[in-house]
Image (cartoon, rainbow, N blue to C red):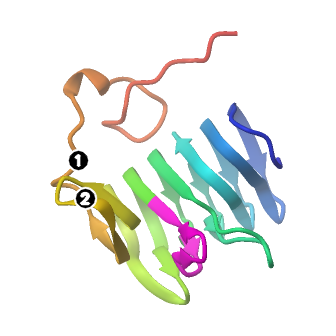
């Protein structure tokens, strides 16, 4: 999928192949995508902001590749939430987070890893270990808060668990990882 400005995609199964979903867009939301035995589940090659909710991957080599095309622009922000990665060699692959026009940001929020090799690899270095665990909230990129209104660059990654404040009324049944944000089907 290439270009455009905004949109939604959901409830799709990608099975086998080199790249399950080749993605580039300005602002986009996806929900309930399943990837099985793809070499790369998602290649988010450019975006301004992309939300990946309730993603399930199993037997995938690279789950989310957040690298640009040669000569292209850097991807913006990729938020992965309430998702499960099972037997994935590298859950997230990044190149350098800084670029001429900004910073590539990846936020993992309520992400379950089951028997994964590497959690996040950037520029050849492992920044987030794999294994089997739940990542409550983690970021690599710019972080904005009261103490850093202009943003603070987190190149090594940062645990945001203590900063994560989600009202209990927003939590509820969903198809992703347990304890996630409430979701329902898109009206038809």
Q: Position of residue 110 (x, y in %)?
A: 35, 48
**Residue 100 position by quadrant:** bottom right
**Residue 149 position by quadrant:** bottom left
| Residue at image mark 2 | 160
| Residue that appears at 69% across and 32% down | 7
Which span is picked out in magenta? 92-106
Q: Is residue 89 visible?
A: no
Mark 1 near mark 2, Cβ–Cβ under 8 Å? Answer: yes
| Residue that appears at 44% across and 84% down | 126
Identify the main secondary structure in magenta: strand
Is 52 placed left or right of 43 in the picture? left
Quadrant occupied by the C terminus: top right
Q: Position of residue 95 (x, y in %)?
A: 59, 80
| Residue at image mark 1 | 164
Instruction: Give the camera-side residue of 1 and 175.
Output: 1
Q: Position of residue 112 (x, y in %)?
A: 40, 54
Mark 1 to mark 2 CA distance (whole Å): 6 Å
Is 155 placed left or right of 60 in the picture? left
**Residue 130 position by quadrant:** bottom left
Say whether residue 56 is magenta: no
């Amino acid at each position: 999928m290439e270009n455009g400005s905004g949109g939604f995609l959901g409830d799709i199964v990608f099975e086998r192949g080199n790249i399950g979903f080749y993605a580039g867009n300005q602002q986009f939301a996806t929900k309930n995508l399943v990837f099985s035995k793809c070499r790369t589940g998602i290649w988010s090659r450019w975006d301004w902001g992309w939300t990946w909710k309730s993603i399930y991957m199993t037997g995938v080599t690279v789950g989310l590749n957040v690298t640009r095309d040669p000569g292209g622009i850097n991807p913006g922000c990729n938020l992965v939430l309430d998702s499960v990665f099972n037997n994935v060699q590298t859950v997230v692959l990044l190149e350098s987070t800084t670029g001429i026009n900004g910073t590539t940001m990846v936020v993992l929020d309520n992400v379950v890893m089951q028997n994964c090799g590497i959690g996040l690899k950037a520029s050849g270095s492992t920044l987030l270990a794999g294994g089997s665990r739940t990542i409550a909230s983690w970021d690599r990129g710019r972080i904005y808060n009261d103490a850093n209104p202009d943003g603070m660059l987190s190149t090594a990654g940062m645990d945001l668990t203590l900063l994560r404040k989600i009202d209990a009324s927003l939590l509820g049944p969903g198809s992703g990882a347990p304890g996630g944000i409430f979701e329902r089907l898109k009206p038809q």
